[in-house]
Amino acid sequence: MLDALAARLNARCDAQPFDTGWYLKDLVRGESANRAGDVVVPSASTRKIAILMTALRAVHAGRLCLEQPVTLEARHQANTSGCFRYFLPGFTLPLRDVLVMMIIVSDNTCTSAVVELVGLDAVNELCRSVGMRGTAHRQPVPPRYDAAADARQEVEPDLDRVNVTTPSDVGALLERIALGAADGAAAARLGCSQALCRLALDILSWQQFQQRLPLLLPVGTTVAHKTGTSSRNFNDAGIVFEAGRPLFVLTVYTGRVPWLMPDGTPGKAAAGHHIGWLCRTCWDALKNDESPNYAGP
């Protein structure tokens, strides 16, 4: 069934003046497809899904507690993402709320604090344990950069130095989280409980950045997802739900996105709409209800 859908997605990708890799898993029928699914790309903040699961694994093991206080210090604020970089240092939140902010607004102050608690080795070990062979976490948070300057100069990331992953790796992790939320044995294979996997899905579904995977979906559709952005990469990875049931996993990674498209549209807007179009096309093909298909461009 996915062959025709994959062909349609690839035709759309072929028409773009930038690179696209994607991974799709139909969670109802068990089929999967991909485009450059095993090609290593900059992960940007989609890597925070693995950081979240590493922290929840530590909670399950009793090494951390969701209610424990985490103090966000000046050393955690040397970043370019999120809200807490603008706060006065020295404020305290429970770990649960730090994890929420790390995901829903991609707050790198919180990410820095969480990675300090769990360690990059533990994040990489979780990735290896679930078969994410193309994934490497090398930096707690990316260094400061001038996104506009990098995009205009068409600077390419050094894949041997930045945090990297593959569309298939992140898709497989998301599927494992969905399975763990429904089955205790599957949760145990992640080193978590069903309740913690459900919490992970809840947090991912609270995502505040809605301009990519959810952009063209019907209002009210639940998407548990995490975006990722760098100078020329605009990514999103998530699970799309229908009537409370996980319907499909879709991860999309764009690269070499131009600063401006030929028609003058900012590349970031074009990439966001492209990701939204891919997701809506999957929704129209895989959904089980009778809602109308997307008739947009």
Image: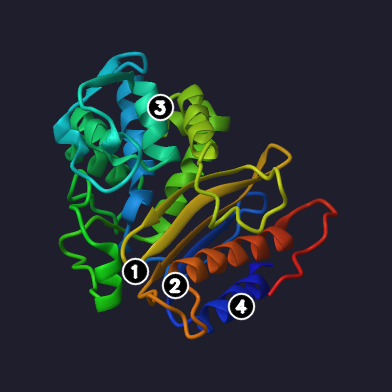
Residue 154 visible from this viewpoint: no
Q: Position of residue 29 (x, y in %)?
A: 67, 54
- In the image, residue 293 sits, relative to residue 68, either above or below, namely below
Numbered circle sitting on residue 6? none
In the picture, the quarter occupied by the C terminus is bottom right
Residue appearing at x 24%, y 55% in the figure: 163
Q: Amino acid at mark 3?
A: Cys
- In the image, residue 229 sits, relative to residue 152, either above or below, namely above
Q: Amino acid at mark 4?
A: Ala
In the picture, the quarter occupied by the N terminus is bottom right
Mark toward the viewer: 2 or 4: 2
Give the labeled residue for mark 1.
232
* Left or right for 141, reference 104: left
Neighbourhood count class around disc 1 (C-alpha, 10 Å): few under 14, some 14–19, many 20 upward:
many
Q: Earlier in the sequence, mark 1 or mark 4?
A: 4
Distance from Cα at disc 1 to Cα at disc 4: 25 Å
Q: Position of residue 124 (x, y in %)?
A: 24, 44
Q: Quadrant of residue 282?
A: bottom right
Residue appearing at x 18%, y 68% in the figure: 158
Give the labeled residue for mark 3.
192
Label 2, secondary structure: give it.
Answer: helix
* Left or right for 19, reference 121: right
Give the labeled residue for mark 4.
7
Q: Amino acid at mark 2?
A: Gly
Label 4, secondary structure: give it.
Answer: helix
Give the labeled residue for mark 2.
267
Distance from Cα at disc 1 to Cα at disc 2: 8 Å
Closer to us: 296 or 191:
296
